[in-house]
Amino acid sequence: MLSNEEQNKIEELRKKLYSKSNPTPAVVKRRRIHEIPHDVKEEWDIPEEELPAVPTPEPVYHSRSALFKRLLIFAAAFFVLSLVVATVVYFRGSNVVSPNNITISVIGPVSVAAGEVLSLNADITNRNNSPIQLADITFDYPDGTKSAINLDLPLKSDQIPIDKIAPGETIRKISKSILYGEENTHEPIKVTLNYRIPGSNAVFTKTTDYSVLIASAPVSLSIDTLKEVISNQDLTFRVHVVSNAVVDIKNLLLRVDYPFGFTFASSTPTPSFQGKIWSLGDLSPGQSKDITITGKVTGQDGEERVFHFFTGTALSADDSNISTIFINTSQTVAIKIPFLSSQLTLDGDTSDVHIIQSGKIVHGEITWRNNLTTDVNDASIILKLTGPMIDQTSVLADKGFYRSLDNSIIWDKSQVSGLASIPAGGSAAVQFSFNTYASSFDVEQSFRNPTITLSEDVEGKRVSEANVPETIKSTLSRIIKVASNLQLTANPVYSIGPFTNTGPVPPQADQTTTYTVNWAVTNSYNRADNVVVTATLPIYVKWLGQISPSDEQVSFNSVSNQISWQVGQLAPGTGFINSPKMLSFQVALTPSVSQVGQAPILVNAPTVSGTDNFANVPIFQTINAVSTKLPTDPNFNHGEDQVVR
């Protein structure tokens, strides 16, 4: 740090230099410098052997210059090499394999019915300049998928080898499967390509996703039950399951989740697991299964009970869990406690759907009850009959009036005295009946899956708690399904038919005579499934094995002497609007002397049976036995049916 004296000198010098009043300083002439000679020795006085050897340092600037020169040369070479590589890549392309240059296009239907075969085409295109090799493509399917080759095998993934795809090449691979799932749901399918590139052991992947809509379930589920019930009343569910698939459905289950307030009573068949799960086994295409569930519902007026129904397949026959759900539906039942309740019974049946045969008389009964603690006055009952199968001329009403204008039966206090005043807790009943048209050619032209609907309205008046008259009303409806008429006719002949018959006519004891038996099956309103005709032969009649048409499925059991004709499915109107289903077969009769004067039976009473597809009930008919009496043979004469000696 400067002293005060030095600072003062500097300050005075500054004033002299910058002051305007200070005169120009005088120029002082510099003195001339004279050279003073000095004697400088050229060498040190120290002896040479005592001087240390000092190495001559290499100039620093030479090392830095060489380093910079090398860096410059390297940068120039790298630039030139990069330029050459870029030029080659630009004009000749690159050998680098990129997943972005590989495309997978999956071609298939947007929707498919569950249980049908799904075929997916995967087009793999290699847009790289190098091949991809050791490749394979994998289709990953959702749970519940089955193999299209073996339905017993689940198909989680389908791996298809490809081997090699050349540059610019497109290869198509096809995967087939059978999807099962819930209706109107999208099932995801993942498609993965695994591949390697030349000179590398690494595995690379390319994936894409595909989605298929399950347009329809492999089974259909219908539930018949009451929409409204009275608390603590029996409630019955009739569940009908039908296979819509084109292949067999394995290990089918039905599960019902009961709501609070429902008490299970019984079912047909009995549950397989936990009182609410039914194992339906395997269903072939078009096959159906029926389950009837009965119980009681309790609750307050206005409450609702929701029942949930699930169908699907299990992994195995003894598994109680549904692995793949086909249908998830619900049924809501409202609990009502009507002031004036009624019950409609048809032929002693109180179920919601009643089945009848055409041409049969329906007997009905209406029972009413006052659930109030006060009287109900001026009550009336109106029953409306709807359906073209009703023969209006046959309608009868006990103490009621049939109004043909609107097909209604009316009961009121002018006809039924008990309706004038119904005491608290009181009940009574009325009866009615009507007939349905029998099947005929004219009827067959217009009726298909015929139904009859019965709608009942019960009204009355009561005095409310506020002493105000008010009308109370109760409604009820029932459905009648008319089952198809499955009928069989049997006509024996001798002189006509597809076979040549031999032997004496009339038949002679201990001699053989052959006959032709013609069967004809007709069906009326609804489709008939699994139709079979069976009959047995007497001990003295022999089966000759001759049938016409020859392609009909006919079998004969020599132990039981039973003939079985598997007719199969019969369309509605068979035998009415088109030809009946017919079969002819030949038998040989060898009567005994004990049968002289008799007309021996050729075929014991045949039976035709099947299932009505609409009414979902068994239908059958048994006719009289077939004898040697030949009413349809034009050459038959009276008395030629009896055995002679």
Image (cartoon, helix red, strand yellow):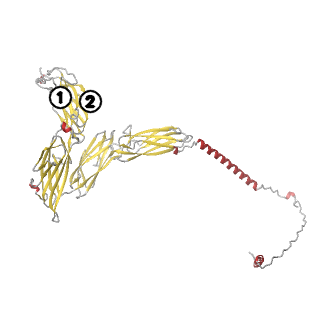
| Image coords of residue 491 (percent x, y) | 17, 28
For image coordinates 45% across by 40% down, the residue present is 122
* Left or right position of 448 against 99: left
Rate crowding at label 1 as few (under 14), some (14 to 19) or many (20 or more) other CA atoms within 10 Å: some
Q: In this view, does 503 lie above or below 341?
A: above
Q: Position of residue 297 (x, y in %)?
A: 23, 54
Question: Do we see residue 538 in this rendering?
Answer: no
Residue type highlighted by circle 1: Asn
Picture disc at residue 287: none
Report how many numbered discs are placed on residues in the image.
2
Q: Nearer the viewer, residue 337 or 582?
A: 582
Quarter assignment of residue 641? top left
Label 2 environment density (alpha carbons within 10 Å; few <14, some 14–19, many ≥20): some
Q: Answer yes or no: do the residues labelled 1 and 2 have beta carbons within 8 Å?
A: no
Query: Gap between marks 1 and 2, in whole Å?
Result: 18 Å
The spot of residue 510 in percent (x, y) is 15, 20
587 over 298 or under it: above or below: above
Kind of residue sitting beneath label 2 = Glu
**Which image quarter is the N terminus in?**
bottom right
Can you say which quadrant of the picture contains the C terminus? top left
Q: Which of marks 1 and 2 is nearer the N terminus?
A: 1
Of residue 555 and residue 566, the one placed in the foreground of this image is 566
Reading the image, the residue beneath label 1 is 491
Q: In this view, does 137 lie to the left or right of 621?
A: right
At mark 2, the secondary structure is loop
Residue 364 visible: yes
The residue nearer to you, when weighing 514 against 542, is: 514
Residue 530 placement (x, y as % from top left): 25, 36
| Label 1: element kind | strand
- The residue pinned by badge 2 equals 552
